[in-house]
Every structure is written in C-alpha cells, then in structure tokens.
Image (cartoon, rainbow, N blue to C red):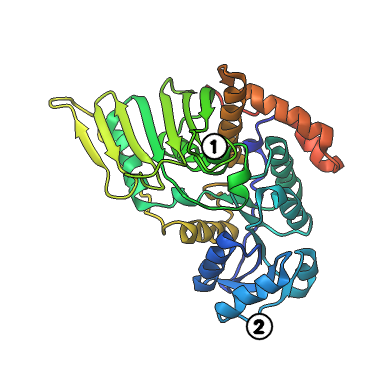
Amino acid sequence: MTNPASGSSGTNSSGDNAPLRAILVGVGAMGRGWLRNLQAADDVELVGVADLDVTAAKTALDEAGLSGVPVAGTLEELVDETAADFVVDVTIPEAHHAVTMQALRRGLPVLGEKPLAATLSEALDLVAAAQVYDRLFMVSQSRRYNPQLFAFRRMIRQLGGLGILVAEFFKAPHFGGFRDAMDHPLVLDMAIHTFDSVRFLTGAEPVAVYCDEYNPAWSWYAGDAATTAIFEMNDGSRFVYTGSWCSEGLETSWNSAWRASGEHGTTLWDGDGPPTLEIVEGRATAPVSDTGEVDPLDGIAGSLRDFVQALRSGRPPMGEARDNLMSLAMVHAAIASAGSRQRVLVADVLAQAHAEALARVDDAAVGDVLRSWTTLTPPS
C-alpha cells in the first residue's frame, strides 16, 4: 500500500473570481452554523440545501433570509439543478460515507464535518475514492483554525526537542440526541479535535497508544464519557490526553488546556487566551525561522476559506482527507486500546481497517487504489 498521502492532489481549480456555488447537506445545529458561514462568505454562493427533513431546511433558510434557495430531501435531487461547484456535508457521521461518495462520483469536491467517516474502513474507502475521482475531500478540523493555536505552535518550536505534550479537557455539555447514546461520546465525537491538534502542533505522527475509558457514576451519557490516553509519537515524545464530558465546575476551554515541555523550557496555553513561554535562563536556543504563516480566520470561517482557496489554487489545505486519516486513526486506536486494555499500534489498527475496506468495496477503481497502497503510516 503506497501511503495514500502520496497520491493525486484531488483538487480542482477555478480560473475566475466568481463565487463558488455550494450545496449544504444537513441543517441540524452544526448545519445552521455552516449556513451562517456560507451566507457570510463573499466568495461562496449557497445554491441548494438538502436535508431529510425538508421542512426544517426551508425553515432554516427562511430564518436566514434565503427562502429562494432550492431545497430537496437528498443531494442527488439538487446536483443537476444547481450546477454546484462543491458540497458541504454536515450530516450525522453514519451518513458521511454515502453523501461524500455520491458527491465525489458526481464530480463534486467535498468539505465535510468531522469525523472523516463513521468507521476507519469507510474513511479509507473515501480517501481512495477522492484519488480515483480526482476531487478534493477535506475534513473541517475547525479548531485548527485558531490564531492562538498558531502562536502556541510557534512557541513549541522554540523548545528544541519535545519531551511531553499534555492536554486536559473537562466540559459538561448536555447535548441530548445521538451523543448521549454513543458508546464512545468523548473519544469518538470530541477528542479528535485535540488529537488532530497534536499532529498540527508537533508535526509528529502517532505510533502507539494506551487508553483507559470509563464512565463516572453521575454521567448522563450511555457510553464512556471520560478517558486518559498516552500516545507514543514517532519523534520519541509522548502526548497525554485526559478528558471528561461530564465534569461540571471550573471547566476548561473547548480547545483543551495544554502544557508542552521540551529541551529548553515549557510553554502553556489555556485554550483561549495567548500562550506563555518560559525558556530556561542561560539556555541558548536556535532562532526559529519565520515561516511566513498567516494566522487564520477562526473556526468554521477559517476552514471554509482554506477549502475555497485550495479549490482555486490546487494547493492542499489543512484537513485534506488523506492527511486527516491519521487523526481519525488515533481515535480508533485509542478505542481499541480501551477495549483490550493493552497498548495498541496505530499501524495495526490501520491494517485491520484496510482489510475491512477491501472486503466491503463495491467500486472496482476504488478497490484498485486500496490494493495499491503498501503502507498507511508515515516513516518513523
């Protein structure tokens, strides 16, 4: 298996400055947030909304002053009518595979909400499909688009060799709905934001994990809402995540609270305000080169702009599906470790998912791409 990250760029480019035409699929709570951001973006035109609940879709558009936008129960009903340039998929995780695959097969790039797919095997299927159909598929890891996170990364680079990165996440949201019934509500639905941020902050990739999941007696979730995970990274460092989704009082930021300890000192970030840095007195550190990076727009607005710019330029964005695959693999490796109560290799989890993807694939070209991959993990 050639690493999927070495395949086609999967991007389209637009030769003019006309707004790109978008179809939004899903108008639940997150979908309405995307609706507001699509409406606010100067370089995007919303040309269709699909939702199984057509009445809810019409209501959302009416409230946004967009009652003239076409509405349908499925994406397929809108594709030909709208001449769209891309799809924004904000459906529930179980629908991500079907919606994304349908869009890719119709020649439409996709900007999807996390997770990439409901299972790791479905994720591999979609990454291969994006390569086959040569269309951009990006996952909106919206918490990467945070100017303070960018500043924290710059400080981490001043620490020299990194020893340990710690993230703590303590919140108590009462969502109701599907999250309350999930088997792994914290790790599967929320922790991927923090896991993905680790890869962004350090440039390192996960090798193995030991994870313990549990559910406090007072938890209102059906599944395990608390966890501690220790990841071994391929640069020799450790990433330790401790979190709970049923911890009321003195809650952390939604972005977690962070501590990075390295060769030359320590940097802290509370997840909201500016990070702080302490370099050991007298310690000579090499200057960190100016990468010329520009702080992003915040959250969904940042990921939408990144996606649109990628479509116009052909430049891979953050969160491209083939890269985001490793963030999702961290999630599923942690779940596998919690279930077995053993250290789990990320490569083993990916290999099992690859076998499952080959067993379920129903597109010959996608199957050929899957069989061509000789490795699914970056070099250590």
| First along the sequence among labels 1 and 2 | 2
Residue for point 46% across, 30% down: 204
Left or right of 101 in this view: 376:
left
Q: Mark 2 points at which residue?
A: 68
Q: Is residue 39 above or below residue 136?
A: below
Q: Most extreme residue toward the front, as rendered?
A: 218
Question: Where is residue 369, by image quadrant?
Answer: top right
Q: What residue type is labelled 2?
A: Gly
Q: Is mark 1 on a helix, strand or loop?
A: helix
Image quadrant in which you'd find residue 365 = top right
Q: Observer-nearest residue: 99 or 314?
A: 99
Kindly identify the residue that appears in the image at 56 percent across and 59 percent down. 30
Q: Is residue 271 left or right of residue 29?
A: left
Judged by depth in the image, the label closer to the viewer, 1 or 2, is 1
Image point (52%, 69%), residue name: 36
Q: Please provide percent x and percent y for residue 52.
A: 74, 64
| Residue 358 numbered tag | none
How many numbered discs, if any? 2
The one nearer the camera, 63 or 197, is: 63
Q: Between residue 267 and residue 212, name the one nearer to us.
A: 212
Residue occupying image coordinates x 58% and y 46%: 180
Residue 242 in view (yes/no): yes
Does residue 115 appear in the picture of this structure?
Answer: no
Give coordinates of residue 185: x percent, y percent: 56, 41
Q: Residue furthest top?
A: 342
Q: What residue type is labelled 1?
A: Val
Q: Is residue 332 above or below residue 117?
A: above
Q: Name the residue under label 1.
A: 187
- Dot 2 falls on a residue whose secondary structure is loop
